[in-house]
Amino acid sequence: MDLTTLSALAFTLVLWASAFAGIRAGLEGYGPAHLALLRFLVASSTLVVYAVLARIRPPRRADLGRIALLGFLGITVYHVALNYGELTVSAGAASLLIASGPIFTALLAVSFLGERLTPLG
């Protein structure tokens, strides 16, 4: 692994790990919904600049409804709920609960979809 990749990985890990503490700090000045909106305005602005510079084509018109629905449910609802949760739960506990999501997903897949887990899984 080269130094650039390692640096990008370290930078991403530091930002990701500090997100829960950052949410907790942000909730001192903003409401949960306002904090989510602020975070997405910053992220969206950054991604628009990148998309223009990288000449990424916009999605097809037929896909916009599905993208909007998935964005609302998978991103907006998740982050607003997380922000509301951090009003009463510590940043560490919120991080642990969110990190346990894949475990619950695997257990639900086994229970309802008949998936089989390997020893590694």
Image: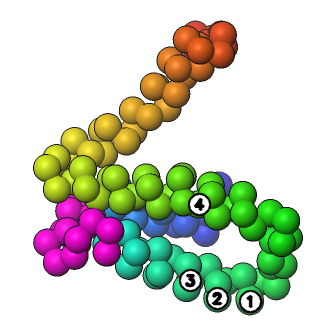
SS class, disc 1: helix
Q: Is residue 48 left or right of residue 26?
A: right
* Residue 34 picture location, percent across and down: 31, 75
Does 33 appear in magenta? yes
Q: For the residues marked 4 and 2, what is the alpha-carbon distance in whole angstroms?
A: 19 Å
Amino acid at pointer 3: Thr
Q: How is the image coloured?
A: rainbow
Q: CA distance from mark 3 to mark 1?
A: 11 Å
Identify which residue is drawn at 84% across, 78% down: 57
Residue depicted at x 29% and y 58%: 83
The residue beneath circle 2 is 49
Question: Could you say which disc has been placed on residue 53 in the image?
Answer: 1
Q: Gap in Å between the C-alphas at discs 1 and 4?
A: 23 Å
Q: Is residue 22 magenta?
A: yes
Q: Are marks 2 and 1 in contact (CB under 8 Å)?
A: yes
Q: Residues within 10 Å of mark 4 (few under 14, many from 20)?
A: few
Q: Earlier in the sequence, mark 3 or mark 1?
A: 3
Question: 52 left or right of 45?
Answer: right
Residue found 55% across the figure and 79% down from its top: 44
- Of labels 1 and 4, earlier in sequence is 1
Q: Is residue 10 visible?
A: no
Q: Which residue is mark 3?
A: 46
Between marks 4 and 3 in the image, the one whose residue lies nearer the viewer: 4
Image coordinates of residue 12 in percent, x first then y, are 48, 62
Q: Which residue is mark 4?
A: 71
Amino acid, disc 1:
Leu
